[in-house]
Image (cartoon, helix red, strand yellow):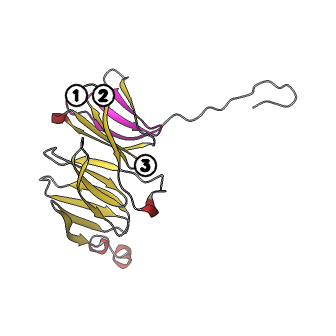
Amino acid sequence: MLPSFTLQTMTSFKAPLPASTCLAFYPPDNNIVAIGMSDCSILMYNVQHNSVVQTLKGHQKPVTGLAFATERKMLVSAGTDAELCVWNTVSWKKVASKFLKLPSKRTNNSQAETRVHFNPDKTHFMAVHETQITIQLNWILWVPRQAFWFYCRCRHAVYSCDGQSIFVCVEDGGVSILEANPLKLKCRINCAAYMPSKRSAIS
C-alpha cells in the first residue's frame, strides 16, 4: 500500500499461513503427530522438540483425513478431491494413490471432506466421503471390496469396537448402522428418536 503523495511503503500484505485441517497421533511415539494442512502437505511434527520431522507432499488439494496402520508401517491420507494416498512410515515416501469414484453430479464440490479409518485389526480401511463409504481391502493394489451409497450427504462414520458394524451420521440428522462385511444397512435411527421435540424442549 503506497500513499499517493510520497510513494513510500506504508504496509504490506502477505498470504495467510496454511491452516491445519486434521491430525493423527503416530502410535509408536505419541510425541509425534501427523498434521494435514490446507496447502496440501502433511507435517510430521515432534511436540516434545517443537520441530517438524518430515513434510510429506503428494496431495493436490487440502488434506482432510489421516490414519495409521503401525504393524504395516503405513499412513493413509485423504484430500478434498477424494484422493487417497498411502505413505511408508519408515521412508515417509508415497507408495500408492488413487481417487474414489464419485457420482458425476457430485465431483465439483471442492469442499467435500474425505476421511479414512482402519478397522480394529488393521486389515483394511474405510474411506468416508459425503456420497459413499468404501471399504479398501488392499491399499497397494487398491481393490475396493464394496461401497455403500447414501440418499443424502454422509457427515461422519466410525467402526464399532469389534469392527463388525459401522455407525454413520447423515445430513438429515439420522444415524445409519451398517454391517461391515458385507456392507449393508442393518437399521436406521431417525433423529426424532433422540432429539427432543420443540414442545418438550420448551416445557
Tell me if residue 144 comes above or below residue 141 in the rendering: below
At label 2, the amino acid type is Trp
Identify the mark nearer the N-term, 2 or 1: 1
At label 1, the amino acid type is Asp
Viewer-nearest of labels 2 and 1? 2
Distance between the alpha carbons at the discs numbered 3 and 2: 22 Å
Residue to which mark 3 is pinned: 81
- Mark seen at residue 92: 2
Pick the residue in front: 48 or 180.
Answer: 180
Pick the residue in front: 13 or 36.
Answer: 36
Residue to which mark 1 is pinned: 29
Where's residue 114, x and y in %?
Answer: 36, 50
Q: Residue at x 42, y 48 (%)?
A: 80
At label 3, the amino acid type is Asp
Identify the mark nearer the N-term, 3 or 2: 3
Label 3 neighbourhood size at 10 Å, few (<14), some (14-19), many (20+)?
many
Pick the residue in front: 16 or 97.
Answer: 97
Mark 2: secondary structure: loop
Distance between the alpha carbons at the discs numbered 2 and 1: 15 Å
Tell me if residue 104 comes above or below residue 2 in the rendering: below
Answer yes or no: do the residues labelled 3 and 2 have beta carbons within 8 Å? Answer: no
Label 1 neighbourhood size at 10 Å, few (<14), some (14-19), many (20+)?
few
Q: Which residues are magenta?
A: 19-45
Mark 3: secondary structure: loop
